[in-house]
Image (spheres, grey):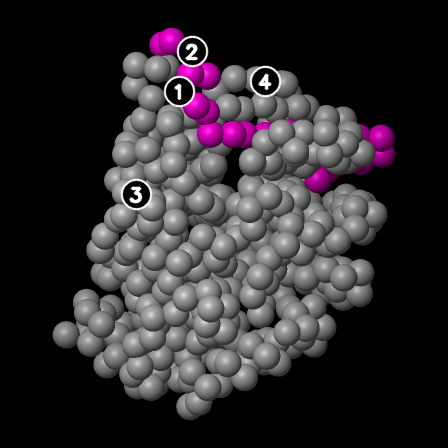
Amino acid sequence: MLRRYEKELSGWGNHPRAVCEVVEPFSVEDVKGGLTRTTIARGLGRSYADQALNSGGRVLLTGSLNLFLGFDDRRGVLRAEAGLSLEEVLRVFVPRGWFPPITPGTKYVTLGGMFASDVHGKNHHREGSVSNFVRSVRLLTPRGEVLDLTPEDPLFWATAGGMGLTGVILEVEMEMRPIQTSYIRYRSFRVRNIDEMLAVFDENDPKYTYSVAWIDCLSSGRNMGRGVVMFGEHARLEELPEKLRKRPLFFVERFKVRFPFQAPSFLLNDLTMAVFNWLYYTTHPPYEGFVDYERFFYPLDAIDEWNKAYGRRGFIQFQFVVPERETLVGVLERIVKRGGGSFLAVLKRMGEQRGYLPFGIPGWTLALDFPIKSGLFEFLKPLMAEIVRKGGRFYLTKDALMDSGIFRDSYPDFPKWYELRRKADPEGILSSDLARRLGMV
């Protein structure tokens, strides 16, 4: 039986907010029964803006549909319900010697949400996004059809990165990665500016599966783009020091610090962010050794509800990808010159990505968190148009600012995607605030 109630919801950025009818299904039949008015599925709410909001409509929570359905040890293929969290996958499979092939920067996401966003990680430049490792998905369309889709089906690729607008994902079958230990062979470099940073990427990316960098967005002049570049590889058993070999495979159960309150909006300013950036930069000297996977992949998960640090107004994440490094440097210069930059600025190299709405293109992606303040949107929107003119695009799972013009200019296969979506949902049952903002429905 469906549980229904009204609730004000938001994404992880706490902006925007919307009152929605929330529905909690406990079976596939419940899900079918919930598709009677405009609806969007929602996992753990870690998309940043209005991706899983539906103002005045229905939001279908998938968290109760979270069962493991099977695992093929020989092929390393997991099948599970779409509401299963990545954290539970890690809890069960890391001690057995398996790891997700692609992981975002948090483990508090669902398998269905990962596929609907076609998430990428620190290995996109070498291995692409999660859809490359998904063998099949079971999709419920608003017409009541249950479809088993494989990569040979066009609707599979319309659902990958389709933001939940082609159907409700019920099950995911995904290849897992064999590992010998829970450790990452890790190396980091502290660099003085963006030129040094990009040179370090060029030299070390061929040697490692995973790479990422933190950038100090308040440094300027000769120090513009200073930061820390980090590389990683799953450690083999023979590589570990003797003391670590005694327990090579384990699920990391780390003590979490809860952010104690909703911070006042004035707490994040250039001074406090400059102090944070200086501390981060100075306390991360060059290092080579071993760290557990939790420290490498999910450092922010150690702080529960860290989004409260941005205050009641919330924040937006501004994540774009551009093909040319000159464009990247130019955008960074604009942000540094304005001030008020993000203290969580993450740079990664990107590669090719399949699909009708792929975020990834060969180049560089920069993700920045901006506390919402007066004048922010007026600064960012012209910058967005410039990024698109230079061949870039914005990540649908993070975006809060695109309009339909910028979206269609940067996603040229949208008309093909739209035709597939229209066939799967001719009455337009599946919708969201994001979809209406971008003219996707």
Left or right: 211 in relation to 308: right
Instruction: Residue 311: give x, y in percent of width and height.
Output: 50, 50
Q: Which residue is mark 1?
A: 237
Q: Which residue is mark 4?
A: 287
Q: Can you say whether 270 is above or below 26 in the image?
A: above
Q: Separation of disc 3 and disc 1 at Cα?
A: 21 Å
Left or right: 434 in relation to 251: right
Callout 4 environment at 10 Å: few (<14), some (14 to 19), or many (20+)? few
Select label 4 or label 1 by which is in front.
Answer: 1
391 vs 178, nearest the viewer: 178
68 vs 408, nearest the viewer: 68
The residue drawn where x is 42% and y is 83% is 424
Callout 2 environment at 10 Å: few (<14), some (14 to 19), or many (20+)? few
Q: Report the residue that reaches farthest toward the left.
A: 1
Using the image, tell me which numbered label, if any, was put on residue 172.
none
Q: Which residue is mark 3?
A: 74
Amino acid on which the number 4 mark rests in the picture = Tyr
Q: Separation of disc 3 and disc 2 at Cα?
A: 29 Å
Q: Separation of disc 2 and disc 4 at Cα?
A: 16 Å
Amino acid on which the number 3 mark rests in the picture = Arg
Which stretch did the figure color magenta? 217-243
Instruction: Residue 178: give x, y in percent of width and height.
Output: 38, 36
Q: Report the residue that reaches farthest toward the front.
A: 74
Instruction: Residue 175: give x, y in percent of width and height.
Output: 39, 49
Callout 1 environment at 10 Å: few (<14), some (14 to 19), or many (20+)? some
* Nearest to N terminus: mark 3 or mark 2: 3
Q: Which residue is mark 2?
A: 241
Q: For residue 203, which quarter of the picture?
A: top right
The residue drawn where x is 62% and y is 29% is 207
Q: Separation of disc 3 and disc 4 at Cα?
A: 37 Å
* Nearest to N terminus: mark 3 or mark 1: 3
Q: Separation of disc 4 and disc 1 at Cα?
A: 20 Å
